[in-house]
Image: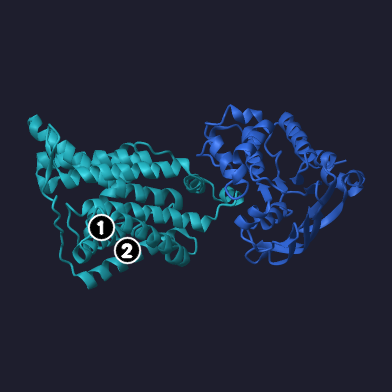
Chain colours: A blue, B cyan
Amino acid sequence: MLEVKGLRAGYGQVEVLRGIDLDVAEGEIVALLGANGAGKSTLNNNLSGIYRPFAGSVRFAGEEIAGWPSPRIVEAGLIQVPEGRRVFPNLSVLENLELGSYRRGRPRRQANLERALAVFPRLRQRLQQKAGTLSGGEQQMLAIGRGLMAEPRLLVLDEPSLGLSPLLVDEMFELVRRINGEGLTVILVEQNVMQSLTIAHRAYVLENGRISLSGPAAALLERPELRRSYLGV
Amino acid sequence: MVELQILLPAILNGLTTGAVYALIALGLTLIYGVLHIINFAHGSLLMLAMYAVFFLHAGLGIDPYLALPVVVPGFFALGYLLQRGVIARASHGRDENILLVTLGVSIVIENLARYFWRSDTRTIETPYSFETVDLGVAFIAVPKVVAFAGALLVTLALWWVMSRTDLGRAIRALAKERQGARLVGIDVDHIFAMSFGIGTACVAAAACLLLPSFYVSPGVGHTFVLIAFTVVVLGGMGSFAGALIGGLIIGVTESLCGLYLGESLGQIGIFLIFIAILLFRPTGLLGHRA
């Protein structure tokens, strides 16, 4: 579904990603792991067309999307739920969800709204409330709900567990597993290595702009270098 | 104490002027709210629209009110292209540059107007220019009543667009969260230009409503835009309801000050309000802390 080859990207003169190769097959959860500053968000924002890659190829659903503007990438069905949620604080929860289908999925907005609210029943009581007044966990639900409104073919979740209480973190990972179980392909970008590897099929570890490790999640859990770097054991 | 027979007409007249101020301020506050810039070209665009209305009347005999369906879409397109083709291009995305570019645009428009149309003030005469409506408590000039109703209708239409359509939601979303807006597939440059276009369409509507009772000259924009700034600050930067209420308050204040202090000093009240707002409530009546 997604095939990235030799992707180089960065900001201005600074190259952050120095040749990334990765692929995601339909129906998978692929975890993208790495410490702060490894280049995870840079990769996401290049996939989503917020920035233009310096070089390399990004094939999504059979099309070369590297360099496409973000509206076109959204239209193709690659949807990112960004780090820090980025919900519209001045709009109601309902309006946030509606805007999720601004570019894609608009004809089935009502049905998708019901589906998103079935996934996040807590949002239903908050529909008329301004998104800025929600708690962090609720905002994260809203951000994912907004992403689901666009009928994603590939959902990129950037640090969905960041800033949530441990209980909510568990809930979030369980939720990712559930929506994947319903057939949605997911890239899970996380610092929470242990839990990500538990639900992911495969994983890539990003270090200094390069993929340093990759493979089936279960196998990676056993790798001593990963355990040393991220789990402290 | 002035009698009620004089006071009421003054208040009503103030409300009619205030509604037009509100309309102009609405465009200004929309552009400020979304693009985070003060549009210095707002007054010049108003002037340009007033000339458009004037020449449509002088050349083709089109009534100012009937010019609305031509002038408003035309100026919407002009605003859209101005933002997309000139302001966005020349400012390289830096707010302080945008400010200077709009100032530059206004100087260019104004001096072109001086060059082509000279500095004389021009007025048009319509059959209803001097007609009045008996409102029971006062006689109000027909053009003022129409301007009041028209300004409120346009405000209502704008409110509907902003709250009930995806375009309006996208504009408001973009005002606060650009990254999030990009990620739901909102074309940022397009929506910026749409906002500028709608803001410009507001002054075009104001021009059609003003001209039956007001003059046009190359400098006429200043008269209104300075007041519109005050309205925006009074109502709260970026607040639509604030612009409407602020406009009406300013209109009535100007009218009452004119009544008590004399016509030429009417604007003193406006600037006293402006100073008081800055001193005691810098966020404006309905504004939020930044």
- SS type, badge 2: helix
Which residue is nearer to you in this view: A182 or A37? A182
Judge from the rendering whether residue A125 lies leftward or rightward of residue A184; answer left or right: left
Judging from the image, mark 1 belongs to the subunit labelled B
Task: State the image coordinates of residue A38 (x, y, percent, origin top left).
Answer: 74, 53
**Residue for point 84% across, 39% down:** A198
- SS type, badge 1: helix
Judging from the image, mark 2 belongs to the subunit labelled B
Answer whether residue A17 is visible to the viewer in this image: no
Q: Are marks 2 and 1 in contact (CB under 8 Å)?
A: yes
Question: Neighbour class for label 1 at 10 Å: few (<14), some, many (≥20)?
Answer: many
Tell me the distance, in whole angstroms, between the alpha carbons under discs 2 and 1. 10 Å
Residue at the disc numbered 1: B221
Residue at the disc numbered 2: B106
**Residue for point 43% across, 39% down:** B289
Task: State the image coordinates of residue B286 (x, y, percent, origin top left).
Answer: 37, 36
Question: Which one is earlier in the sequence, the residue at label 2 or at label 1?
Answer: 2
Say what amino acid the circle numbered 1 marks: Gly
Say what amino acid the circle numbered 2 marks: Ser
